[in-house]
Image (cartoon, helix red, strand yellow):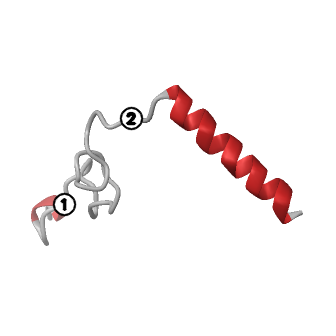
Amino acid sequence: MDYAKSGGSKAAKNAPKHKEHNAKGTDKNPFGDRATKEELLARMKAAAEARKKAE
C-alpha cells in the first residue's frame, strides 16, 4: 500500500503559521523607516538615566 497517497496533503514547508503584529512592511513598521544613529544614542542615554534614577 502506498501510504504517501492516502490522507490529506502535507502543509507548505516554508510558510509562516501567522503574521506578526510588527512585521516589516506593515503600518506599525514600514520599510525604510530606520532611526538615525543620533536618535538611537539619545534613546539609549535616556534609558540609562531612567535606570540610574530608579536605583
Image location of residue 45, percent across then percent down:
70, 41
Work out which residue is located at the far top of the displayed protein and give it.
37
Say left or right for 53 vs 42: right
Q: Which residue is mark 1?
A: 10
Q: Amino acid at mark 1?
A: Lys
* Residue drawn 61% across the image and 38% down it: 42
Which disc is residue 18 wearing? Answer: none
* Residue drawn 28% across the image and 33% down it: 32
Say left or right for 17 vs 9: right
**Above/below status of 20 relative to 13:** below
Local crowd at mark 1 within 10 Å, few (<14), some, or many (≥20)?
few
Local crowd at mark 2 within 10 Å, few (<14), some, or many (≥20)?
few
Q: Quadrant of residue 9?
A: bottom left
Q: Quadrant of residue 21?
A: bottom left
- Of labels 2 and 1, earlier in sequence is 1
Image location of residue 47, percent across then percent down:
69, 51
**Above/below status of 23 relative to 11:** above
Tag 1's secondary structure? loop
Image location of residue 35, percent across then percent down:
44, 35
Q: Amino acid at mark 2?
A: Arg
Given residues 39 and 33, the one toward you in this image is 39
C-alpha gap between disc 2 and disc 1:
39 Å
* Residue drawn 23% across the image and 55% down it: 27
Quarter of the image where the N terminus is located: bottom left
Say left or right for 34 vs 1: right
Which disc is residue 34 wearing? Answer: 2
Name the front one of labels 2 and 1: 2
Tag 2's secondary structure? loop
* Residue drawn 89% across the image and 63% down it: 55
Mark 2 and mark 1 residues within 8 Å of each other at the beta carbon: no
Given residues 32 and 53, the one toward you in this image is 53
Image location of residue 39, percent across then percent down:
52, 35
